[in-house]
Image (cartoon, grey):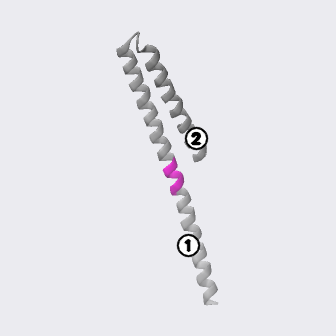
Amino acid sequence: MSQDKKIKIYEWSSYVLLLGATVVFLVLRAKQPSLSNTLTMLILLVAMFLRMLMERARCKSFEEENESLKADLKHLTSLLRKEKKE
């Protein structure tokens, strides 16, 4: 699976979990406040974890792109040196 797909999955699933936490809080607030608070906090923790994974995948993607750009720069620099020598 590509990094872009992972980033999108993590992003949208965290949004869904935030929406779910809101619904759980609003629905269970009047009936069982302690359960509502516990479930809401648990869902919010999972949503934050997914956001962290999204940022990690984004960072890895940037690092891979940066490495390929560095390799291209080295290659072009070596070609330029050869061109100047000739």
What residue sits 50% from the left and 51% below the top?
60
Which portion, as a residue range, is magenta?
58-63
SS at mark 2 in the image: helix
| Amino acid residing under circle 2 | Lys
Horizontal and vertical percent position of residue 13: 54, 33
How far is the residue under mark 2 from the one under mark 1? 32 Å
**Where is the C terminus found, in terms of image quarters?**
bottom right
Going from N to C along the chain, the mark reached first, 2 or 1, is 2
Q: Is residue 47 above or below residue 52?
A: above
Q: Determine the image quadrant of residue 41.
A: top left
In the figure, is residue 51 to the left or right of 83?
A: left
User: Which residue position holds label 2?
Assistant: 8
33 or 43, nearer to the observer: 33
Residue 30 is inside the magenta segment: no
Q: Position of residue 55 (x, y in %)?
A: 48, 45
Residue drawn at x 59%, y 68% is: 72
Looking at the rendered image, the disc whose residue lies closer to the viewer, 2 or 1, is 2
Q: Which residue is mark 1?
A: 74
| Residue type of the residue flagged with mark 1 | Lys
